[in-house]
Amino acid sequence: MKYRIYIDEVGNPDLGSSDNPNHRFLSLTGVIIELDHAEKAIHPQIEDLKRKFFHSHPDDPVILHRKEIVNAKPPFESLRDERTRDRFIHNLLSLITTWEYTVITICLDKKTHKETYQTWRYDPYHYCLAVLLEGFVFFLNRHGCQEDVMAESRGGKEDIRLKASFHRLWENGTDYVYPDQFQQSLTSSQLKIKPKTVNIAGLQLADLLAYPSRNQILDEQNLLGRDLAPFTQEILKILEFKYDKQEDKLFGRKFI
């Protein structure tokens, strides 16, 4: 089987903003999907959902985005109607439950990272990506597979940073995964980066799951500072069965 991990980012990697409570944390969520399942189940079913509720058309596809869905902003204004919203959420949660995928989320406290390493630090994004890809390599090894990595385009300098960070890991490895292990597990030395407009189901699923997963980690660390939103709580009930696990060990949720 061929797998791909789709990555979504919550927060920003700027250490200078780490003292701001609104920008203290950076998280990366990876959603691992078998490519045949993405093609035959997730993509067509997500397109059916968008046609049903938002009249999505192949020439101008609606792209699912959690923030706009929650706030019922265009093209999701139909969700301002309570009955329509309830039906949509029911349909969406049912799909997220039945699809087959594995989730890994890494959340970094940039403030603690900055204070701990006064003279030398990892770039926050590179640090999170390294830990996330270590988990992906361990997953691939357990399943005897090789595959690749895709992230959503952030544009310009951000995309250059993403690609450079990925290539550095592929060439140099980490303290826990040697370079040859990365190179044997990942089929390409180049990170795949695609814009939101390309309408990739795996990236849309990662977008829907990343924020709830990050908030679950912060809530467990008593760092969220508010109650989990109802929609987030529903997503988290599903994620308990989707996080990467091996027997009684949880690999899919990590606070660093």
Image (cartoon, rainbow, N blue to C red):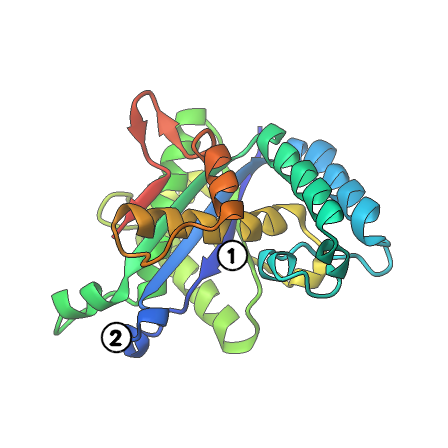
Q: CA distance from mark 2 to mark 1?
A: 31 Å
Q: Is 134 located above or below residue 77 in the figure?
A: above
- The residue drawn where x is 13% and y is 65% is 116
Residue 191, disc: 1
Disc 1 is placed on an element classified as: loop
Q: Residue furthest top?
A: 247
Disc 2 is placed on an element classified as: loop
Measured from the top left, where is residue 219 in percent x and y?
Answer: 32, 49
Measured from the top left, where is residue 99 in percent x and y?
Answer: 61, 31
Q: Is residue 141 left or right of residue 46?
A: left
Observer-nearest of 158 and 55 = 55
Classify mark 2: residues with Cα within 10 Å, few (<14), some (14-19) or many (20+).
some
Q: Is residue 122 left or right of residue 150?
A: left
Observer-nearest of 11 and 122 = 11
Identify which amino acid the numbered label 1 is placed on: Leu
The reply to whether residue 22 is visible in this rendering is yes
Observer-nearest of 216 and 187 = 216
Q: Which residue is mark 2?
A: 19
- The residue drawn where x is 47% and y is 51% is 229
Residue 194: quadrant of the picture? bottom right
The reply to whether residue 35 is visible in this rendering is no
First reached walking from the N terminus: tag 2 or tag 1: 2
Measured from the top left, where is residue 222 in percent x and y?
Answer: 25, 52
Q: Is 90 located above or below residue 192 in the figure?
A: above
Measured from the top left, where is residue 251 in percent x and y?
Answer: 33, 36
Residue 244: quadrant of the picture? top left
Is the N terminus in the top left, top right, bottom left or bottom right quadrant?
A: top right
Identify which amino acid the numbered label 2 is placed on: Asp
Observer-nearest of 140 and 6 = 6
- The residue drawn where x is 12% and y is 74% is 119
